[in-house]
């Protein structure tokens, strides 16, 4: 059907217009023709952003794993579904066919059932990028359990917070993980976390690094012997369209992480449709997304979107610089990858290295290059285009969020002319608005505004687990009747969007969203610290890095040794994970505050951006005198 695979620009505009004129007909046709349902929907869409309440395909019955696996068996049973590339290039890659995936998911699903997991139960998955990660995700979906994958770089405290927030009954982990030439003791981290998690009854442990670990009696079990015993047939649980499929945590600017809840049918339809179009995916293609399944990119575009299209999706366990900086390019040559999807931070890091790392490999299989997670700067975009794509593979700069479930703004390759640093046009079904701070819509070009979505799309998150009020306040209260993304953006004269960055207190470091509040809370736990404020500053590779301003309890003491900096970063590593460590720590006598006591991060941001000429009016501050002192001691001059 023409709607499903857009082939030229005029067609994009036609399809887009149709999707806006009659969104229900548009999505209904796609849902009808491309998926298997046990029962048809009664109603395509009902919505009310003031509550907010959004329902897609209400009344329909389905199981997403039938759409991602079972229905492919007839024609693609022997096709590779998951191509696992291990951390160590000397270890053989594993090709898991659709038939093998079917059997492995069913076995895993039966193990989950046997361990007492039922429809609606929450299961926390804390695994490295090994096949068991994708398989356990699908096994949960098979039986209607709600998976909550936690990125295996988070600390035990971060893990326990997430487990407790959604009351997980089970944790699936491994003895450890490989990361380049290091190993990580994942099971040790889980053990620490579970000291704080009475809700967890059982732990399944996959063997990956063969390390000696503690197994707690009556709680921990090795996975493999259970799988060996399990039947390879498990009837899929028939789910309602709106039943939750998964929870995935994302940082907020304040408070604890938000467990974004995604539903089943709309998420499936939307991720499959966007995957097909944005990667111009064809049956024989080999597709590789370098993200971790612990993030939304991995959920939507390593697991669900590709598998719903019967694609071959590469899962890479390792890191870009092991054994050397040519690893990504070596994998592309080895597996003849056609679509490659990565983050600007990786591109920037690899662009710093000798060109020889790229040039020694044959990258001629590439057809589409993707980027996601943060704004891509002009230089990185051109390097990617010139040296990886050889100016032949269009770059799809895809803008979206954990909350949106799938891509929202992106070129369609070979259809939409690309433009460096622009995510370009909204995908079909995505209706955007740019708003000014007073809540008026910006119609002019090149004016930076706040990016909103004015109409529901099928993959949008439905709520925050256990806190619908927070969902409403965070996303639907800033602008009436609109979903507010938290991002700034502008539009050029042809309607292309450029994302300018977060407008709230979320900082994107190496593509990871970090809220300032939890980091500040962690810093303040150090016994020598009285108060702190964290802002982002421009960084060549990470995009943004973290700069902490710290007031020590011992007033007046600003000469402090390196040790204290190390200790503060240690606390952050324990509370959140190494990704939240501060690059710079400045000890200050005070923080600029409004008369009501609110920290003026805007001023701190200007200081770390070395833009002190534009501090604005500081005379209304409670303590204008500290600004001079902070500038004096700044570490970015
Ligand atoms: O600020 C935007 C940025 O990443 C945020 C969402 O982060 P997360 O929920 O972790 O999801 C990342 C993967 C989808 C957005 O609010 N962002 C994402 N993609 C882009 C981007 N900023 C600019 N350009 C992009 N292509």
Image (cartoon, rainbow, N blue to C red):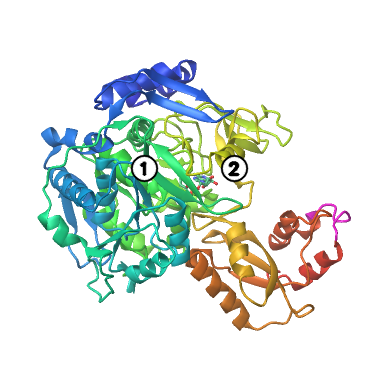
Q: Is residue 7 visible?
A: yes
User: Is residue 533 found left or right of 618 in the rendered image?
Assistant: left
Circle 1 SS class:
helix
Task: Report x, y in % for residue 106.
Answer: 17, 45
Q: Main secondary structure of the magenta part?
A: loop
Q: Nearer the viewer, residue 545 or 359?
A: 545
Instruction: List the residue tagged with mark 1.
Output: 300
- Ligand 1 contact, mark 1 (Cβ < 8 Å): no
Residue at image position (51%, 67%) is 575
Q: Is residue 390 visible?
A: no
Q: Quadrant of residue 634?
A: bottom right
Task: Report x, y in % for residue 126.
Answer: 35, 59
Q: Give the magenta part as a residue range.
A: 614-622
Residue at image position (81%, 70%) is 629
User: Is residue 588 found left or right of 495 in the rendered image?
Assistant: right
Q: Where, quadrant-wise, is the C terminus in this rendering?
A: bottom right
Residue at image position (16%, 42%) is 234
Marks 2 and 1, how far apart at CA: 21 Å
From the viewer's perspective, is residue 603 above or below residue 63? below
Q: Quadrant of residue 118?
A: top left
Q: Where, quadrant-wise, is the N terminus in this rendering?
A: top left
User: Is residue 623 found left or right of 154 in the rendered image?
Assistant: right
Task: Report x, y in % for residue 177.
Answer: 31, 67
Instruction: List the residue tagged with mark 2.
Output: 487
- Ligand 1 contact, mark 2 (Cβ < 8 Å): yes
Among the two numbered marks 2 and 1 on one chain, the one whose residue lies closer to the N terminus: 1
């Amino acid at each position: 059907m023409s709607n499903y695979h857009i082939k030229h620009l005029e067609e994009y505009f036609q399809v887009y217009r149709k999707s806006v004129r009659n969104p229900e007909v548009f999505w209904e046709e796609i849902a009808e023709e491309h998926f298997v349902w046990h029962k048809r929907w009664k109603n395509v869409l009902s919505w009310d952003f003031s509550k907010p309440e959004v329902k897609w395909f209400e009344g329909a019955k389905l199981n997403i794993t039938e759409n991602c696996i079972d229905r492919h068996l007839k024609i693609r049973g022997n096709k590779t579904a998951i191509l696992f590339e291990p951390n160590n290039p000397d270890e053989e890659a594993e090709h898991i066919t659709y038939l093998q995936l079917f059997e492995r998911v069913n076995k895993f699903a039966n193990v989950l059932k046997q361990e007492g997991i039922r429809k609606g139960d929450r299961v926390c998955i804390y695994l490295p990028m090994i096949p068991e990660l994708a398989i356990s995700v699908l096994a949960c979906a098979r039986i209607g359990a709600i998976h909550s994958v936690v990125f295996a770089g988070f600390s035990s405290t971060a893990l326990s917070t997430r487990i407790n927030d959604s009351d997980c009954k089970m944790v699936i982990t491994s003895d450890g993980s490989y990361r380049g030439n290091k190993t990580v003791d994942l099971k040790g981290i889980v053990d620490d976390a579970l000291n704080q998690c009475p809700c967890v009854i059982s732990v399944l442990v996959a063997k990956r690094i063969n390390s000696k670990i503690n197994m707690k009696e009556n709680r921990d079990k090795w996975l493999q012997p259970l799988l060996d015993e399990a039947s390879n047939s498990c009837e899929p649980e028939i789910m309602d369209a709106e039943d939750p499929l998964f929870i995935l945590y994302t940082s907020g600017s304040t408070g604890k992480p938000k467990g974004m809840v995604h539903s089943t049918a709309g998420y499936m339809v939307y991720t499959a449709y966007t995957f097909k179009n944005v990667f111009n995916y064809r049956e024989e293609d080999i597709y590789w997304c370098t993200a971790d399944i612990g993030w939304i990119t991995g959920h939507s575009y390593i697991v669900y979107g590709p598998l719903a299209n019967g694609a071959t999706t590469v899962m890479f366990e390792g890191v870009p610089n092991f054994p050397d900086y040519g690893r990504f390019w070596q994998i592309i040559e080895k597996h003849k990858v056609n679509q490659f999807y990565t983050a600007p931070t990786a591109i920037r890091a690899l662009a710093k290295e000798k060109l020889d790392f790229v040039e020694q490999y044959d990258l001629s299989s590439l057809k589409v290059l993707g980027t996601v997670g943060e704004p891509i700067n002009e230089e990185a975009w051109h390097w990617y285009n010139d040296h990886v794509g050889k100016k032949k593979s269009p770059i799809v700069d895809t803008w979206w969020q954990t909350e949106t479930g799938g891509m929202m703004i992106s070129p369609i390759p070979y259809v939409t002319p690309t433009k460096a640093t622009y995510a370009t046009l909204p995908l079909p079904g995505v209706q955007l608005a740019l708003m000014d701070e007073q809540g008026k819509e910006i119609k002019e070009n090149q004016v930076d505004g706040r990016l909103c979505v004015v109409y529901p799309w099928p993959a949008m998150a439905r709520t925050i687990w256990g806190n619908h009020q927070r969902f409403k306040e965070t996303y639907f209260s800033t602008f009436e009747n609109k979903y507010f993304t938290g991002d700034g953006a502008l539009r050029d004269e042809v309607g292309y969007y450029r994302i300018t960055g977060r407008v709230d207190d979320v900082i994107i470091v190496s593509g990871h969203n970090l809220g300032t509040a939890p980091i500040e809370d962690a810093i303040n736990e150090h016994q020598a610290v009285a108060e702190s404020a964290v802002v982002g500053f421009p960084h060549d590779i990470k995009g943004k890095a973290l700069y902490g301003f710290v007031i020590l309890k011992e007033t007046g003491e600003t000469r402090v040794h390196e040790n204290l900096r190390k200790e503060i970063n240690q606390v952050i590593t324990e509370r959140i994970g190494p990704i939240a460590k501060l690059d710079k720590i400045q000890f200050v006598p005070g923080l600029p505050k409004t008369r009501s006591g609110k920290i003026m991060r805007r001023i701190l941001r200007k200081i770390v951006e070395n833009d002190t000429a534009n501090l604005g009016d500081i005379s209304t501050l409670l303590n204008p005198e500290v600004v001079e002192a902070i500038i004096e001691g700044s570490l970015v001059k």
